[in-house]
Amino acid sequence: MWNQVYDPFGNSVLSTLAAAVPVVILLGLIASNAVKAHIAAVIALIAANIIAIFVFTMPAGMSFRATLLGAVTGFFPIGWIVLNVIFLYRLTVEKGAFEILQTTIGGVTSDRRIQLLLIAFAFGAFFEGASGFGTPVAVTGAILIGLGFSPLAASGLSLIANTAPVAYGALGTPIQGLSQVTGIDPFLLGAMVGRQLPFFSLLVPFWLIWVFAGFRGMLQIWPAILVTGVSFAIPQFLISNFINPWIVDIGASLISMACLIGFLQVWRPREVWTSPKLRSHDISDQGRIVPVPAITSPSSSQVWLALTPWIIVCIVLLIWGTGWFKSAVNPWATWNYAVPELHNMINKVAPVAPKPTPEGAIFSFTWLTYTGSGMLIAAIISGFALGFTPGGMIRTYAQTIRLCAYSLITIAAMLAIGTLTRLSGIDATLGLAFAGTGVLYPFFGTLLGWLGVALTGSDTASNVLFGNLQKITSEQLGLSPILMGAANSSGGVMGKMIDAQSIVVASTATNWFGHEGTILRFVFWHSIALACLVGGLVMLQAYVHPFSAMVVR
């Protein structure tokens, strides 16, 4: 047995600085753009092992086993989800189904403000829920450019819109990652996030149009904005609290798009806004307006064929997320592996735990009920529906693996860091330091999630890095670990618009290379303001009734 050490230097300041080294290296390398994200993650993982072994006295064998356990956990289930989502996306692109979907959605209205609601917010949320990891910004940015929006408008507004859905992105991957490192039920974490983000799902559409068209331009279409926000926020709450956290974005976005399109059948703005440029930032766009191509409306059969893969995804994942399905399948489709010389061989001790408490280290391979497995099955069914042969799908899958290779390495390394810092007590040392912020911790803990996403580019990565720290710190302060775990994810979504990876994706999708700094300056203050608003809400939920009654118990 080995007992965790939280103050190896006998000085809390020095011990905290040592514990912060892996995180500082990771975030610093990513923020500097000096190396690729997967290389930064591997370097930080090496640093974490060195700190764990030589500073926090963790036996080397345990350190290496913890690293391997985290890496495997990174691929199953998180990397498995990402791989199969991108596989489905590539199938739809190859058969032209995705292009038909783009054309259909872009042709609903000629008002630029309503196009933003439909494409940047609602349609982008669908792709956030289905794939995440930069896909929504790439897709919506490309569509907006194709409709004639200026580069700054297309990129910056896509980034602002891609906020409220992020915590449930890629079929709930951030929630899954948060659950992995905290040990808290993902259904509880998803439900708590669902009691925070709906406020911002209602706010962000108003914010988005205000930024684009000004206050008067926003007021002219407030009914459409309200319909969009309410029809997204209410399903977001209901699905996250009463169904599961995996299909929240997919369900809410589909409902929101349907409600907005239906509302447009009975309501139209008095003035149709045709300018595709940002009213207050025209000079930054350098007059680059892309001519709008003639849109040929697809037939009803083409539209339904384009929708078929995503309908199949919704049906399959709805089944995969139910408790009865997991209960029926897991008894015969599960392999539990207790890591030798690691499982129950590490004790949490005071002040983190009131008495020595063994840390479990079991890899549970629930191969069939993984969300990624459901996604793969949905992709195969969709492939046949789109006319693929088995050989064609195998070739596309091989291409997808090559495309996602670096992302999978990054995810595995991130989870390895999170698992190692949890088992070595490194994150407990950081958590004890954060507990020093006292009653203001709910606010600063939320901003910690924002900082993590801003620098890593991923709500999943931020949750993995800081999730257990949030749990430890909240327990030290007598706060709900479910509240603060959710706050890390909810605050993190507002950092998504300023992370380097998202901005590069946006500039690439809009062919506005070399203007990443302009995009960052445009979205930066929006990111900070929205993150502070989330922090204020978490403070209310921590201390003030009736907001405190919203906390999941």
Image (tube, rainbow, N blue to C red):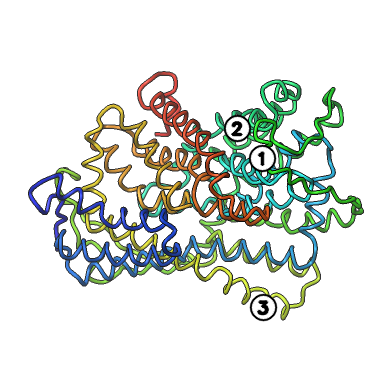
Amino acid type, residue under disc 2 in the picture: Val
Residue 552 or 211: which is nearer the viewer? 211
Q: Which residue is mark 3?
A: 394
Which label is found at residue 204?
A: 2
Toward which corner of the image does residue 441 lie, by quadrant? Answer: top left
Q: Earlier in the sequence, mark 2 or mark 1?
A: 1
Q: Position of residue 379 (x, y in %)?
A: 68, 65
Answer yes or no: is residue 3 visible.
yes
Q: Position of residue 34 (x, y in %)?
A: 41, 62
Toward which corner of the image does residue 45 lie, by quadrant? Answer: bottom left
Q: Earlier in the sequence, mark 3 or mark 1?
A: 1
Q: Position of residue 372 (x, y in %)?
A: 56, 62
Amino acid type, residue under disc 1 in the picture: Phe
Relative side of 293 to 400, left or right: right
**In the rendered structure, are the residues bearing label 2 and label 1 in contact, judged by CB atoms less than 8 Å apart?**
yes
Amino acid type, residue under disc 3 in the picture: Ile
Q: Which residue is mark 1?
A: 121
SS at badge 2: helix
Relative side of 227 to 173, left or right: right
SS at badge 1: helix
Which label is found at residue 241?
A: none
**In the rendered structure, are the residues bearing label 2 and label 3 in contact, judged by CB atoms less than 8 Å apart?**
no
Across the whole image, how many numbered discs are drawn on residues?
A: 3
Which quadrant, please, contains the N terminus?
bottom left
Residue 521 or 116: which is nearer the viewer? 521
The relative height of residue 298 versus residue 493 in the rendered view (above or below) is below
